[in-house]
Amino acid sequence: MRLLARMVFHAVVVVAVLGAAFALFSHIHLTLDDSASHLIALEPSDPPVKPLDWTPDNPNRVRILAIDGGGTLGLSMLETLSAIEHRTGQPISESFDLFVGTSTGALIAVLLNIPGTDGTPKYSVDEIIELYQTIPPKIFSAPPAHTIATLDGLIGPRFPNQPRIAQIREVFESLRFGDLLNPVTVLSFSQKDNDIRRFSNLHAQDAELRVGPVIAAVTSAPIMFAAVRLSGTEALEGYYLDAAFLVTNPSLFAFEQARRRSPDARLVLVSVGTDTTDETISPMVAEGGAATWAIPLIALSMTYQEKHITRQLTSILGKNDAQNVEVHRIAPPVPASTNQFSGSPELLDLIRQFGRQYVSDNQGEIQTVVEALGYPVTPATQSAAAAAHDDQSGKQPLTAKPERP
């Protein structure tokens, strides 16, 4: 009986793998003629938008925020950033000198640095949390005809790109990378280069890029959405996808970029992501062959990066005091079965609760990070921050800017 069950399981998996392989192929070839997926990322402006200068708040200390990919799991990451924002009394954009993100982490990094009309951040972390609860139901859904035509993601993208790109246009409008408040780097996979493409407003060739098309590209998760074709220059022209299946945790990229620009400064790297808490490989898959392993390999790769990239970075740098680096990892535990591509309000609330629980259980670590960023923490401000974060409204005002060392 067990042998028969395994044969049936293998047959189903083979069909799924073939469908998934065809779906990935269609990302690059068959579905890319969708006009909604062709975006103009560069149109010359007058005057030209200039790249940002590398001017850390303290030239002897560079504070870096590296944010993992993970779809709607970004909600749990945002809860931890909300705790930091309330405890420091300052927008996150004023607590870090460099922001680096993959996929949903790229989206968060940019949202944190959109300027408002008065030059301050347009969104607080709590307001970004609200966006993360209202937008997913609009983009993680598909008309029945689309679901049937793609076999729910087996032979084409599970979700159409039009609703997602419409939401991106509404949020970012005509914003360009050089308009952001701080240096921001986001990662994508370039089909033309067959490599990771870094978009950074520190680079002259990227400062004039429209933020919307780039965010659409870096969040085009394979199988879920069609790849995005960017155009504007010959060098830019090509198809781009979400890089999370290769670089879920961008901490190494963040470290390399900061160290190259500030070779002698002390680096404070805060890596924010999630920590998968249960197995992602079932016993039946573990005992199987190529057919049963194909699909879980992507999840396994992402889980490995979540757990080990920052740990390895800490281990390597910790053996060399000359590197002068301090690394912190903030990662709320999230069950592996959590669907990061769902707009279910109940699931979004649950993901948010994972982050809130982590903050509640790790007050000491949050305080350590706040102190590493250069903010003095007193019992009074600690209690006030905890009370503000516990308020379900998430609309607590920020306090006066503290003096920095």
Image: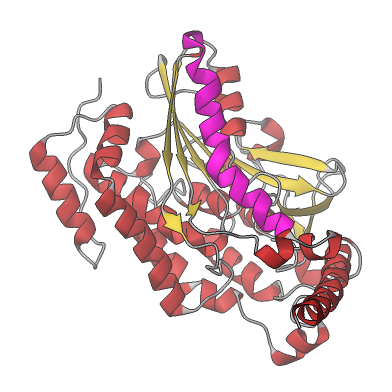
Left or right side of 200 for 404: left
Left or right side of 39 for 256: left
Left or right side of 52 for 156: right
- Viewer-closest of 50 and 130: 130
Q: Position of residue 385 (x, y in %)?
A: 18, 48
Is residue 77 among the parts visible in the rendering?
yes
Identified at 15% across, 55% down, the residue is 387
> Vertically, is 282 above or below 200?
below
Would you say residue 153 sits in the magenta stretch? Answer: no
Query: Which SS does the magenta portion mostly show?
Result: helix
Q: Position of residue 134 (x, y in %)?
A: 45, 73
Q: Quadrant of the C terminus?
A: top left
- Viewer-closest of 398 and 285: 285
Query: In which image quadrant can residue 96 be found?
Result: top left
Identified at 56% across, 78% down, the residue is 138
Q: Position of residue 53 (x, y in %)?
A: 53, 26
Identified at 36% across, 45% down, the residue is 120
Is residue 89 among the parts visible in the rendering?
no
Q: Position of residue 149 (x, y in %)?
A: 82, 86
> Vertically, is 315 above or below 180?
above
User: How many discs mark residues in the rendered view?
Assistant: 0
The region drawn magenta spans: 296-322
